[in-house]
Amino acid sequence: MDDYTDYDALGLAQLVRTKQVKPSELLDASLSRAEAAQEELNCFSALFPEIAREQLDQQLGDGPFAGVPFVTKDLAVDIKGAPITQGSVAWKGHVATEDSTLAARYRKAGLVFFGATTSPEFGLTTTTESTLYGQTRNPWDTTRTSGGSSGGAAVAVASGVLPLAQASDGGGSIRIPAACCGLFGMKPSRGRIPMGPGRTEGWNGLSTVHALSRSVRDNAALMDATHGPETGSRYHAPPPARPFLAELDHDPKPLKIALWRTAPNGTKPDADAEGGLKYTANLLESLGHTVVEAAPQMDGEALGKAALFTISANIAAMIDDRAKVLGRPVREDELEPITFSMAHLGRTVPMIELANANNAFQAAAIAYERFLDEGGFDMTLSATLSRAPEKLGVMALTADRETMGAAVASFTPHCPVFNQMGAPAMTVPLHWTDPTATAPSGLPIGMMFGGRYGTESLLFALAGQLERAAPWAHRRPPVWLG
């Protein structure tokens, strides 16, 4: 199928629906590109065409994505019979015994699973590099990171393997790779998308799941197909008044948007990111919106400490659970050095610190909503990345701990705040740097819009307007497999 990459996922589904193409032809097209991408960019942890072909032998139904090839991240989302390793040597050889709740909803939507994309160990850093799978390379510049932790998913979509991929976000892990690779990415509100059946939240509510994509409509339609309460949910995001996809049919009302330049930890955008903010603010104003520089007041040091303690405690518990399955302790050489040190921290943090962490997250959420209320703002605008995608190796879990920590903290400083608040945020590919020797097409730097809890509908409406005003689908990286 020569024109496979001319279509987004809904477009491919329409071809199947009208019998212009067979699902098996789409699978063959995606698999051939996946194999090429794996060779050049190392973005897959596993390919399992046999699972896809077994699906095709069954009834796909009439879901919105019936017959469309799809991949999930090698972290947290189980596909029955498929390997899932959490990017860790300690999980090597593990195979899922059942579908996760989200995978079941994907099947109902008609998506066909053929592979899993790379992640750093447990999704713990903003680059996709691991001892188990090596370095995942950015198709815009193969010396640069694809972002993390959903870097493999971003590379698969950005290089033309497929138009839409599952991703997860515990501190920016949907938005960061999307921004690094020139894609659209939406982090949903806490409780919007299921994470079961064994649990209903990740990292004490910091982590959530959804997708990154080339088109906004694919992203919205996938949320329509998958959102809603699951068994045992302690909370769930408010249902939309109408389908998320319908929000793209019209421009939003004129919005008042706060330009949030300096992150709570004090990081400011560099010249490249600042150029993106200036361009985006001008674009928004040309569309009738108002942009005012303003920022909520938050304790960045307290938030950083709270995130470290919360994630470390969860990682320690996860490793201990794995030890029970193995019937022995997980060895130090089965974990990345920084992961091992985080697990040690997680076992020694006083219990009161987890209460303090939760209090810090709630204080941030309250401060943010009060800021929006007092200023009459509908949402905020920040640079998703404070600088162009970093060189590979700098932020890996095998790097020097202090150097790596400083690089991660300053690379995407606004992203984790929305996980801590539980609020939705999206990155939109609106800016590229000037070309360089290793990046002849420039490097993407996404622009991030954050909303109030439960306001994905408004974010999607703005994203649709921006996509019409400043389209990006025609921009293709030097490593393009179309």
Image (cartoon, grey):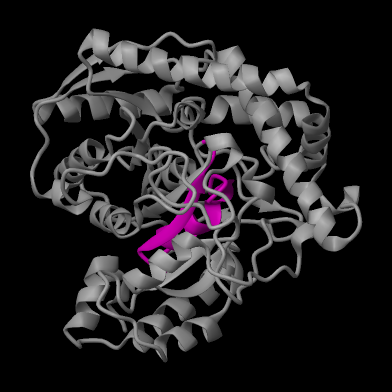
* Residue found at the very far front of the displayed protein: 232
What residue is at 18 percent from the left and 45 percent from the top? Answer: 464
Q: Position of residue 212 (x, y in %)?
A: 39, 52
In the displayed structure, 169 sits above or below 14; it is: above
What residue is at 69 percent from the left and 39 percent from the top? Answer: 314
Q: Is residue 241 left or right of residue 481?
A: left
Q: Is residue 304 magenta?
A: no
Q: Quadrant of the C terminus?
A: bottom left
**In the depicted view, which residue is nearer to us: 14 or 361?**
361
Q: Position of residue 92 (x, y in %)?
A: 76, 65
- Image-quadrant location for residue 286: top left
In the displayed structure, 91 sits above or below 306; it is: below
Q: Which residues are magenta?
A: 142-171
Query: Is residue 482 in view from this perspective?
Result: no
Q: Position of residue 190 (x, y in %)?
A: 43, 38
What residue is at 58 percent from the left and 35 percent from the top? Answer: 204
**In the depicted view, which residue is nearer to us: 452 or 356?**
356
In the displayed structure, 259 sits above or below 345; it is: above
Q: Is residue 456 left or right of residue 175?
A: left
- Image-quadrant location for residue 350: top right
Q: Position of residue 59 (x, y in %)?
A: 35, 86
Query: Is residue 143 in view from this perspective?
Result: yes
